[in-house]
Image (cartoon, rainbow, N blue to C red):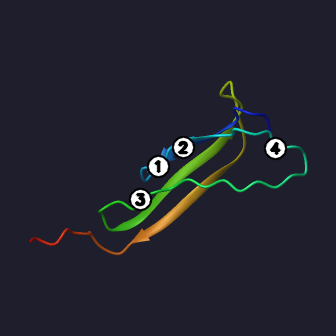
Amino acid sequence: WDVGFRLNFVSGNAMSGANLTLSQPVPPGAVIELSVPMVAPNTSGSVRGDWRMSTATGTYFGDVLYVIIMVNGPTSTPTP
């Protein structure tokens, strides 16, 4: 993968996650760890976000990567 390739949110709930752009090339056979900080929504249930790699020019490739979380209940801020 070349500099500028991106991990893009494509559908579902991004959970406040932002697209990630590679700042260094990834040579064939190399391993890289990608991390996208996310925030769980305030609604109960199953939440899914789909992500996919693209070239710097926006051509998608590879399989869809997905995140599924279970939210047990709405969160609330205590009243002072």
The relative height of residue 56 versus residue 35 in the rendered view (above or below) is above
Which disc is residue 9 wearing?
2
Distance of mark 3 from mark 2, alpha carbons? 14 Å
Farthest top residue in view = 57
Helix, strand, or loop for circle 2? strand
Labels 4, 2: front one: 4
Mark 1 Cα within 10 Å, few/some/many (few <14, many 20+)?
some
Residue that badge 1 annotates? 12
Q: Residue at x 71, y 56 (%)?
A: 33
Helix, strand, or loop for circle 4? loop
Mark 3 Cα within 10 Å, few/some/many (few <14, many 20+)?
few
Report the front residue among 77 and 60: 77
The relative height of residue 75 versus residue 64 in the rendered view (above or below) is below
Which disc is residue 39 wearing?
3
Q: Residue at x 68, y 24 (%)?
A: 57
- Image quadrant holding the C terminus, namely bottom left
Q: Looking at the image, is mark 4 or mark 3 earlier in the sequence?
A: 4
Identified by mark 2, the residue type is: Phe
Identified by mark 4, the residue type is: Val
Residue that badge 4 annotates? 26
Residue 72: x %, y % from top left: 35, 75
The relative height of residue 42 versus residue 16 in the rendered view (above or below) is below
